[in-house]
Amino acid sequence: MARIDRSTLRCVGRAVPAVALTAALTVAAVVSEDARIDPERFFAAERSGCIVDERAPLAETPVSEGEEQAAVERATDAEELGYVPGQIVVVYEEDATSSDRREAAEELGAEEVGQTVEVEAGSVVSLDIAEDMTVDDAVQAARESSAVKYALPNYVAETFDDVVATETSFTTVAGDDRVADQWHLPFVKAPQAWEALASCGEALEPVKVAVVDTGASLSHPDLTAVVNRDRSIEVVWADATSLASWTGLPLRGDGYTNGGAAVSEFTSHGTHVSGIVAAQAGNGGVLGVASGGETSYANELVDLVVIDAFSLLASNGKPNATLQDIVYALDHARQSECRVVNMSLGFVSDDADLAQFFDELCRGLTEKDDMLLVCAAGNSNARTKNYPAACDAALGVISISERTAVGSSSLTFRRPFWRGSDVLRSSFSNYGSWCDVSAPGESILSTYVRSGVTDGYATMSGTSMASPVVAGIAAMVRAAHPSLSATEVKELLCLTATDLYKAGKDEQTGYGAVDAEAAVQRALALRQGATEQAPPAPAPETNPTGPEADAAPAPPAPEVEPSPSPAPETPSSPAPSTPAPATKRPQQSSESQAGAATKAPAAAQAPAAPAKASKPTVKKAARPTLRAMRRGFKVSWRKVSGKVSGYQVQYALDKKFKKSPKIKTLSKGKKSLTVKKLKAKKRYYVRVRAYYRQDGQKYYGKWSPARSVVTKK
């Protein structure tokens, strides 16, 4: 049904003659027979200066379905959505120009705001999207741009807890020595590791450790002299609705949000985690795993950098950290030259692009920047992957519990996952083939700040507590042997872990419980030349890995069905200390490891004539990653190590690549390709290989395993 154009009849000045209005109405009526305006209302409106269409009130304007959805989304809290409304995170391709980036943003009606973070995966920046776009629409549109490598919602991270301090587990700092209640220290043999470092005869330098969390109390006696205030920061959202206000300011404590002047949330999560890593020795409170105890290296092993990434306050009063916050925090840790990073947090999502982005990000930080990323596995009592803990380059940590320390009344021992042991995976802890090691995480006593103002101590439970135990041990290993790479430290921690469930690696406990003494002794032996080889890779796991393992219906042979998770990371009563388990995995002797390196040199031979250059070996490419687009797809692949001059991408409509296959050749710097103008709703098979150019010839590696993608209409 036709309507009178309200733009011509919206408001008419009193000076316009009524005859002119009558003429306008007559013309409009001719255009539409359905246009009926009551004459009395018309002239009443004319006398007041306005003309009103009775079927189209002046206050109304047409609103599309997309605009309605965007409005509803923007009115919903980020905690409920799982991401921040009105924003997306974009990672641009390495070769994207400023013009490419501007064009990609303009297509979304968006603009770049906040700081761009340069990481190995690309340039990471946040976009404020147009008012009439939902986050999902903006993400899908951004992924169509050839300049965009990843487009993601600005996801909200979790600390896997709902922490509320209780009087029974909280004590003030009135000089009470609480070390006897820290059962995790003797369990992982931290005191023995301190003694080994003090007696090694080597000059040791402190290791920078970053704690990415909710901040830390700067007034707490066990932290005030430990935290590096020059490098510790708070990621601030002065205005929660605008990314332009997002920046980093000096750390003020634990619980400040949105740049406010007062503490507005009281989890004390970061204070507790920071104390587990490095609480000060010698002052009558608690001890950090890497504190050094009463040795000559007391408080000399760790330089603690605390990064408060949880500064965006949700409507329920709980602090949030977004994907962009965590990327910014990791980049700050990199610029601060931190060599160990603890993340008692994660993103639980089935977004394949998020997983791939974190894989690239963590691999770059580990291999290029030599940062060991230690991450909590999560508290869902499930195989559910949590990122970044599930990344290959990260060290994913499972929580374990000891009967004497937590008590037989704990759900962990009332409904055990296997029988015959006093050390079990904690009832709340995530697990799976993607996890690496285990550490104490139930009833862990550490530093605490109550209601944002009162410093003290409390026990908390969760993989958030297990992760900093491992981070503290990793710091001691890096102090013992600074030349070990982050990857070698990870392998060493796995190699020296104590088997708990099965020999080798299993999905219930990874490689087993971390052993600080064994790890530090091993690092010192390598430093002092007891062996001439880097630590070997850990023994193969006893459970299958990969998608098949993750999809398995149940944990390996538990005798009792897993029970629902209790409320994780809630403070509980202190527990007595307990010795560590004694069973160790058989290890290779240093002599056998060095065997190949100690062989006698071969007999001297007469010099031979110069040989013709041998045919180079080009390594096989890994399976690529595909993303469907409108009448096309985007393929990405990992950089192939060794001799590489470039890559080839082949795609076809059949698995055997015989039906009109196409090949695209790209330079060495490329790690992705966008293919357009294909048939819609067709399945294409794609594979990648590397090549190397020598003496005018190309030498090809083997094709990667193929993957398929169905193009969009």
Image (spheres, rainbow, N blue to C red):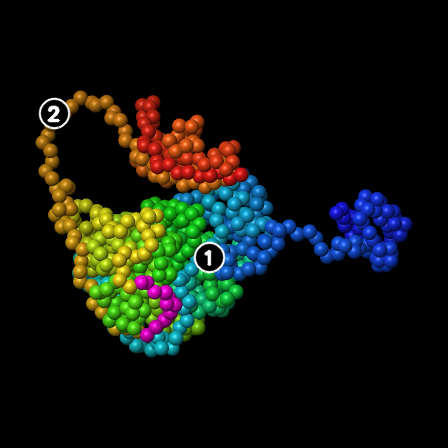
- For the point 31% across and 63% down, which residue is it? 561
* Magenta stretch bounds: 561-573
Observer-nearest of 15 and 494: 494
Q: Is residue 45 magenta?
A: no
Query: In this view of the protein, can residue 640 be seen by the observer?
Result: yes
In percent of width and height, residue 668 lies at 38, 33
Secondary structure that dominates the magenta span: loop
Residue receiving disc 1:
156
Of helix, strand and loop, which one carries label 2?
loop
Give the left or right position of residue 233, taking residue 194 as reference.
right
Observer-nearest of 145 and 171: 145
Residue receiving disc 2:
606
* Residue type at numbered disc 1: Val
- For the point 11% across and 25% down, which residue is it? 606
In percent of width and height, residue 251 lies at 43, 62
* Residue type at numbered disc 2: Ala
Q: Which mark is residue 76?
A: none
The quarter holding residue 644 reads top left
Distance between the alpha carbons at the discs numbered 1 and 2 = 67 Å
